[in-house]
Image: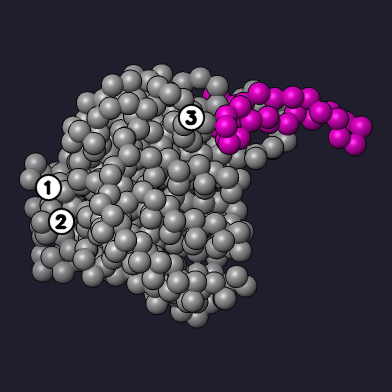
Amino acid sequence: MFHRSVSVLDADTRGGLYYSDVSTTNSGGGKRLEVVTVNARGFGRSIFLHSPELEAYSYPEDNPFRTERAAMTREILVSHGMLSGRGRAEHEASAAERDVLEKFHVRRYLDAIVAAEGGQLDIEGLQMGLGTPDCPVFRGMYECAALACGATLTGAHLILDGRADVAFNPAGGHHHAGPATASGFCYVNDVALGCLMLAERHRRVLYIDVDVHHGDGVQDAFYDRSDVMTISLHQNGRTLFPGTGFPGDIGVGDGRGFSVNAPLPPGTYDEQYMRAFGAIVPPLAGAFDPDVIVLELGMDGLSGDPLGGLKLTNNVYADIIETIMGFGKPILATGGGGYHPGNTARAWALAWCIFCGEGGHDDLVGLGGIMLENTDWIAGLRDRVLVVEAVEAGEIEEAVSDTIRAVEANVFAIHGL
């Protein structure tokens, strides 16, 4: 649980953010204020990051990536009264500055994005992944990417300054972009930059990626480093883009054992996903002992997602968040994939409720979502449990067991497990 001593001035004036209950305690003969948690897991300051300016930009109509998902999430939360009150608040973010983006992305790549937006896309720009079906050229593409990145970096600042225990940017999570490449709908890698910012301030960072696609861009950024551990649970790369992220990919040099990959078979359902997550993430998190956790919450693992092949309900993401919150570390969370906009927005809204300690309420459980293959719901955000055929379940269980054994064999001993 978070118990953080603050001064009276801090408690009264920090950016208008909500704090949980405070109690006066005596320590060494003097008085101090200690934050006392108000939600189920002790996260008293949860900040929702959103910029209304993002709503002005959109990918081309025929592209499956919908920027409006973040605004949809916010609308759901407003309707549930979940963006105000003690312990939670909104925070508007501005676009990331060019010099900040250049901490990860090379200058000529950022120049190419701006040039392409202005109608000048040359061979080098094409080789950088611009102008493809996944990463099309559209008006405002640079501004859109910089705004989404700026929100994630604002969250990192809030955590570093002690003003948030959880910061959630549903518009972020662009984990495929490389230093000089656009890939998988991603132009600017906000999560890699967020991890870099935290690491520059001497924080040990645990990056957990639960997108259906492997978080290749973030893994590559830290493949030879030991101050950032990356763990990605994703659909097997032999069956899905980007075709990477196998158990033997564990890092090099100082980073050996700090890149962890758990590829899962198509059809993986809640129980087996959580079995893999529980077997891999908590032991490694305990051994690594991070100062902060960065969580990429792609929702394209939901059953029926047009680009993914897993069969998850949004309950598994609620369970993941509960588990991670139990580690007692600050969390910088982002969105990511999710190509059924309605179901994705509902899942992110549920995630926010869990961050705020509201996950056990009956009014979060209802009808709709992936079970009924629609985005209408009655009195709730959670999905119904899906039924899995016994034969299919047995095959998936065996494949998940193979992945767990491979991860344990490849990295556990390196961390004394």
Q: Amino acid at mark 2?
A: Asp
The answer to whether 61 appears left or right of 47 in the picture is left
Determine whether the residue tagged by mark 2 lies in a helix, strand or loop.
loop
For the residues bearing labels 1 and 3, Cβ distance under 8 angstroms: no
Q: Residue at x 55, y 63 (%)?
A: 284
Front residue of 209 and 266: 266
- The residue furthest right is 29
Residue 63 shows which numbered tag? 1
Q: Which of the 4 image quadrants contains residue 342? A: top left
Q: Which of the 4 image quadrants contains residue 121? A: bottom left
As measured in the structure, the alpha-carbon distance from the residue carrying label 2 to the one carrying label 1 is 7 Å
Which residue range is magenta in the image?
16-45
The answer to whether 178 appears left or right of 185 in the picture is right
Determine whether the residue tagged by mark 3 lies in a helix, strand or loop.
loop
For the residues bearing labels 2 and 1, Cβ distance under 8 angstroms: yes
- Residue 258: % across, % down: 50, 69
- Residue 4: % across, % down: 69, 37
Front residue of 372 and 257: 372
Q: Disc 2 marks which residue?
A: 134
Q: Disc 3 marks which residue?
A: 360
Say if residue 149 shows up in the picture. no
Disc nearer the start of the sequence (3/2): 2
